[in-house]
Amino acid sequence: MPDTSKVPSQLKIVRDSFCKVQTVKKGGLEDTLNLTAIYRLINGVSNFVYLLGTLRILFAQQNNKNCIYFSDKSIRSIQINVDFIDNAVSKPGPIENTELADPENMDHLKRDLEEGVEYQWLQEEQWKLLFSWYGGGPIYARNVFASNCVEAHPIILKFAIVNADGSYDIQNPELRPFSTLFSLGQVAATFVDNDADKEEEVMSPSVHLWVPFAELKSMYTCVNARNVQVTLKDLEHVDHTRYVEIPNDYLHTLLGNLHFSKNVVFLVEKKCNPMPGSAFVWPLVKGVETWNQFEVGDILDVQVWCISSHFNDRMN
């Protein structure tokens, strides 16, 4: 859409041996031109190329003639130099998307936004071009998953890779978006080195996911546990910030059915030697603290004990 404001301009009509110099109405050297008027003047001429960067308009050959006929006058080309970027007309400011952000999590869009009214998705190349011109943000990339659907509100998870020596840094996590239809097993599969396995749900993977004990307790409920007891004294010694591995039998669970804390960081533990039958140990030390013996009359927490049973037999 051409700018309709009047701006200081220079109009120059270039001729060749077949074309005479022609003056355009409402225009001339040092005159004030209306860009809309210029567009109207050239509207009837076909096969022209308009380059926004320099505002140079070139008219191509038409019908194998040396000149293009416009208003019964022979015009070879028109060059218009308009100094509107720096002086006369202020360009738009930076892209401002903060009003679209969820106040509790700036990485997510608000849930009640109406697509096509309050925001519009752009192709990647379109966004890059606009961003190169104006800057701004924040950037909300579309996420297209295997189901070929665009998800406006993906789940953003944070990950820290565990080193071979068992060390990790949760202060600088990697952020990855996932569909709410992804399972924990599919999330684990994205970290598998073998490309052939990346699209499959990994149930006994060469990659393990670990979360703080408090997160695992909130998402893993043992509804069928019976005759399982643990003392309140035991619970007092549990470090809820300690990382424990997500059990394999829970990897089928969909992310949309889980409720993690906002800032939880998953640990990604890769087996150092993924070959079948490899005796090479995993980097992290597995298991929870040893549980004390309970006594008759003690207060019990079935859920915590059930979770702990997944790790007691895996302690190194």
Image (cartoon, rainbow, N blue to C red):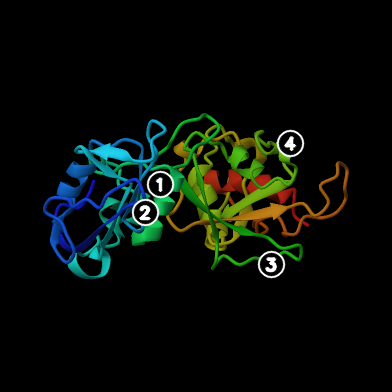
Q: Quadrant of the C terminus?
A: bottom right
Is residue 300 at least partly visible in the picture?
no
Q: Amino acid at mark 3?
A: Ser
Q: Residue furthest front?
A: 17
Residue placed under numbered mark 2 in the picture = 130
Q: Earlier in the sequence, mark 1 or mark 4?
A: 1
Q: Earlier in the sequence, mark 1 or mark 3?
A: 1
Task: Give left or right: position of 52 versus 171.
Answer: left
Helix, strand or loop under label 4: helix
| Quarter residue 248 falls in | top right
Q: Amino acid at mark 4?
A: Ala
Most foreground residue, 255 or 200: 200
Q: Where residue 91 appears, x then y in whole percent?
A: 24, 62
Name the residue at 62% across, 54% down: 244
Q: Residue furthest bottom?
A: 87
Name the residue at 36% across, 51% down: 16
**What's the CA distance linking mark 3 and mark 4?**
28 Å
**What's the CA distance linking mark 1 and mark 3?**
41 Å
Residue placed under numbered mark 1 in the picture = 126
Is residue 267 at least partly visible in the picture?
yes
Q: Amino acid at mark 2?
A: Leu
| Quarter residue 32 falls in | bottom left
Q: Where residue 87 appears, x then y in whole percent?
A: 21, 70
**What's the CA distance linking mark 3 and mark 2?**
41 Å
Helix, strand or loop under label 2: helix
**What's the CA distance linking mark 4 and mark 2?**
37 Å
Q: Which mark is residue 196?
A: 4
Task: Give left or right: position of 7 versus 116.
Answer: left
